[in-house]
Image (tube, grey):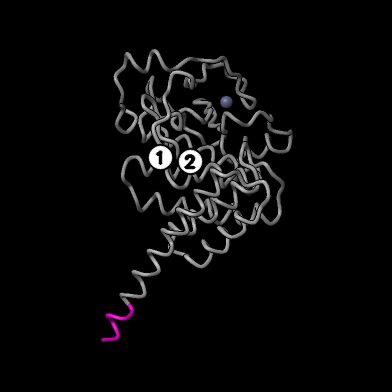
C-alpha cells in the first residue's frame, strides 16, 4: 500500500505506462502517464465515492499538463480547445507561464498543482460547471489523502457549488457521472459541509429517481443515517446550552 502517493519505485514502474501526447496549444510532444487500472486492486470507496486502491492512487495521474506552456486538462476530456479557447489560454496562461518540472512519479503536492492548473485552464476557457465541479472534487480528494482538511473542505465547497449549477443548467453525464450519481454527490458534499437539510432533500431526489441502482440506494440509506446522527448531536448540544 502506498501512503500519500509515495510508493516503492518498483511498484510504480510496473503500474504506470506512458502515452504520446502533443500539446494542442504549443505543439510540444511529451509523454503522458497513466495507471494500469487492471493491476490496481480497489480497496474501498468513501461515502462521497472517492475510490481507494491498493497500489497507486490513480487520481494523481488524471490530469494532462504541458510543462512548457501550462495547458492542462483532465485526461478523460478528449475535446481539443476551439480557436477561441486556445487564444484565451495562450493570452491568460501560456503568456505568463514559467514552466514546470514534475518528478518521474508525482507526489501529492505535484498532483495538487496539476489539478489546480486544470481548474485554472477550465475557468479561463469558460468550461461547463460540471467540468469545474469534477476537477474541484478530485482536487479535494487529494487534499484528503494528505490530511489537509481545510483545503479539502474549500474545494468540496467549490465542487458543490458547481455541481448545483450544473444540475440545474447542464446535461448529463458529467464525464462518467449520471444524473442520479451527481444528485447523490450533491447530498454527500452537503453533508460534509454541514448543510443537513440540503443533504436530505437531495437524498430523497436520488431515492425517487427510477434510474438509481440498488447499490446507490444503499449508499443513500447510510448517508441518511449519518445525517440523522449529526442532527441528533446538534439537538443534544442545543438542549445542553439551554440548561
Ligand atoms: Zn504546451
Would you say the beta carbon of the disc 2 residue lies within 8 angstroms of ligand 1? no
Q: Quadrant of the N terminus?
A: top left
Instruction: Identify residue for label 1.
Output: 142
Q: Are marks 2 and 1 in contact (CB under 8 Å)?
A: yes
Quarter of the image where ligand 1 sits: top right
**The one of 77 and 180 positioned closer to us in this rendering:** 180
52 relative position to 73: left or right? left
User: What residue is at 60 percent from the left and 23 percent from the top?
Assistant: 23
Residue 138 is labelled as: 2
Q: Residue furthest right?
A: 83
| 108 drawn magenta | no
Q: Crowding at label 1, few (<14), some or many (≥20) Cα neighbours within 10 Å?
A: many
Q: Is residue 31 above or below residue 116?
A: above
Query: What label does residue 100 carry, if any?
Result: none
Q: Position of residue 9 (x, y in %)?
A: 31, 16
**Most distant residue in the bottom direction:** 243
Screen quadrant of the C terminus: bottom left
The CA span between labels 2 and 1 is 7 Å
For the residue carrying disc 2, how many other residues have a C-alpha within 10 Å: few (<14), some (14-19), or many (20+)? many
Q: Secondary structure at mark 1?
A: helix
Q: Residue at x 68, y 50 (%)?
A: 210
* Along the viewing direction, whichever of 219 and 189 lies nearer the viewer: 219
Residue 212 placement (x, y as % from top left): 62, 47
Residue 126 visible to an observer of this rendering:
no
The quadrant in which residue 6 appears is: top left
- What residue range appears in magenta? 238-243
Near-viewer residue (129 or 31): 129
Amino acid at each position: 500500500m502506498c501512503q500519500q502517493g509515495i510508493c516503492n519505485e518498483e511498484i510504480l514502474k510496473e503500474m504506470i505506462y506512458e502515452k504520446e501526447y502533443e500539446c494542442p496549444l504549443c505543439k510540444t510532444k511529451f509523454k503522458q502517464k497513466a495507471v494500469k487500472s487492471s493491476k490496481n486492486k480497489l480497496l474501498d470507496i468513501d461515502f462521497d465515492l472517492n475510490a481507494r486502491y491498493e497500489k497507486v492512487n490513480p487520481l494523481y495521474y488524471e490530469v494532462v499538463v504541458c510543462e512548457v506552456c501550462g495547458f492542462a486538462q483532465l485526461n478523460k476530456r478528449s475535446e481539443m480547445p476551439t480557436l477561441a479557447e486556445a487564444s484565451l489560454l495562450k493570452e491568460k496562461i501560456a503568456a505568463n507561464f514559467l514552466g514546470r518540472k514534475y518528478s518521474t512519479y508525482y507526489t501529492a503536492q505535484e498532483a495538487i498543482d496539476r489539478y489546480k492548473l486544470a481548474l485554472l485552464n477550465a475557468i479561463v476557457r469558460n468550461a461547463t460547471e460540471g467540468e469545474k465541479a469534477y476537477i474541484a472534487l478530485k482536487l479535494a480528494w487529494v487534499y484528503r489523502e494528505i490530511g489537509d482538511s481545510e483545503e479539502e473542505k474549500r474545494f468540496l465547497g467549490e465542487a458543490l457549488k458547481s455541481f448545483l449549477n450544473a444540475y440545474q443548467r447542464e446535461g448529463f453525464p458529467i464525464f462518467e457521472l449520471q444524473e442520479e450519481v451527481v444528485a447523490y454527490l450533491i447530498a454527500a458534499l452537503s453533508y460534509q459541509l454541514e448543510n443537513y437539510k440540503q443533504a436530505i432533500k437531495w437524498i430523497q431526489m436520488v431515492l425517487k429517481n427510477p434510474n438509481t441502482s440498488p447499490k446507490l440506494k444503499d449508499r443513500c440509506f447510510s448517508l441518511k443515517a449519518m445525517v440523522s446522527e449529526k442532527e441528533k448531536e446538534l439537538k443534544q448540544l442545543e438542549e445542553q446550552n439551554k440548561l
